[in-house]
Amino acid sequence: MSPLLSVEDLRVRFRTMGPLKALASGVKNPFVDAVCGVSFEIRKGETLGLVGESGSGKSTIARTIMGLRPPTGGTIRFDGQVLNGLAPTERKPHLRRMAMMFQDPVGSLSPRLTVRSLLMEPFRIHGVTGRDPAAEAERLLNMVGLPADFGRRYPHQLSGGQARRVGVARALALQPDLIIADEPTAGLDVSVQGEVLNLLGRLQGELGIAILIITHNLNVVRHMTDRMAIMYLGRFIEVGSTERIFTQPRHPYTEALLSANPEPDPDAVLDRVELSGEVPSLMTRPAGCEFHTRCRCAQGICKSVFPSRAADREDPRHVFNCHFPLSERALAGATNVS
Ligand code: ATP
Ligand code: SF4
Ligand code: MG
């Protein structure tokens, strides 16, 4: 099956200060590479989880896919069409089929608009006419389990969970094929988290929408996603089926992340691995494997040679970048792919 979304070698560089300030403060390289050569695919109806520590570049990937900032390099294809480089008018029909739930549910809703206006905004932006706003808003509110009279409320009158539901309703307005959900459970009580996730899961099952879920919550990834990608300093260091990664992680960083999960998976066979030390700065990336400063398995070569990508022979879609991947048995089955 051809992928719905295909991202190849995506790179995003930010300027950290203006040229004059950089000159005055003697900073030679006033840029950070927030996303460094990321590639992945999402198939129709598939759910991909994206995890990694704060600042690893997850939201930047999401915003770049949605066209909210230009990539520095690489290719973003949606349903076979290359999106980057398209003029806004050419891009618009494709963006109509993609929707984003932003990381900050209340802050991402314009405070001066009622919920009904917010729900109608995607129709206005994409020039979809001939709909009865009241009926449409009611339909969408109903889909996410909110009463019709919520249409008259303003964002500040919503709880975090209600704002999330409005975010889901807005994302569903134009019946997208792909939803990008950036931290869909952040800041919510556990019970409300469950409600929002059940809602997303139900809608995905009923509507066959593909979802990219960005989250710090590994239990969400475990229960909601088919495949997962682990990011470190702007790179994907391991990608594979969620089931396989939770039970047979190959990268020591993945192992540490999973074992630090407060509610570990009962089926997983991981010992607890402490992830010590700070995440290195994007301004001063370590040489070689960028995880070597925190890795319990690091050896001499890790400090100078960047590990190429390897694929597991049993499951070629399970790939990782490590000179000394976990599990000797699987090590014998690993083959270099780049
Ligand atoms: P979190 O889990 O905290 O949401 P994240 O993985 O989503 O983190 P991003 O928001 O994508 O991380 O940020 C990645 C890096 O890019 C960070 O170091 C961040 O400071 C930097 N960054 C993001 N946006 C900009 C910007 N507009 N200008 C400069 N740097 C930026
Ligand atoms: Fe650790 Fe070396 Fe693998 Fe990097 S390449 S994760 S430092 S063992
Ligand atoms: Mg983020």
Image: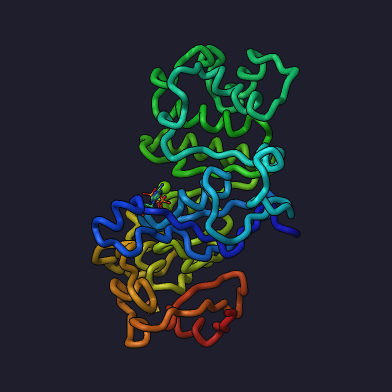
**Residue 134 rendering spot, x and y as whole percentages:** 63, 13
The answer to whether 304 is drawn above or below residue 118 in the figure is below
Rendered residue at 45%/17% (across/down): 112
**Residue 221 rendering spot, x and y as whole percentages:** 48, 53
The answer to whether 167 is drawn above or below residue 301 in the figure is above
In the displayed structure image, the side of residue 207 where residue 196 appears, left or right: left
**Residue 122 rendering spot, x and y as whole percentages:** 62, 28
In the displayed structure image, the side of residue 3 where residue 115 appears, left or right: left
Rendered residue at 42%/54% (across/down): 14
The answer to whether 62 is drawn above or below residue 190 in the figure is below
Considering depth in this image, is 118 or 272 the residue closer to the camera? Answer: 118
**Residue 51 rendering spot, x and y as whole percentages:** 44, 56
Quadrant in which the N terminus appears:
bottom right
Query: In the figure, residue 188 lies in which quadrant?
Result: top left
Rendered residue at 54%/17% (across/down): 147
**Residue 252 appears in the figure:** yes
Query: In the figure, residue 240 lies in which quadrant?
Result: bottom right
Quadrant in which the C terminus appears:
bottom right
Considering depth in this image, is 234 or 246 the residue closer to the camera? Answer: 234
Rendered residue at 52%/65% (across/down): 37
Considering depth in this image, is 41 or 274 the residue closer to the camera? Answer: 41
**Residue 205 appears in the figure:** no
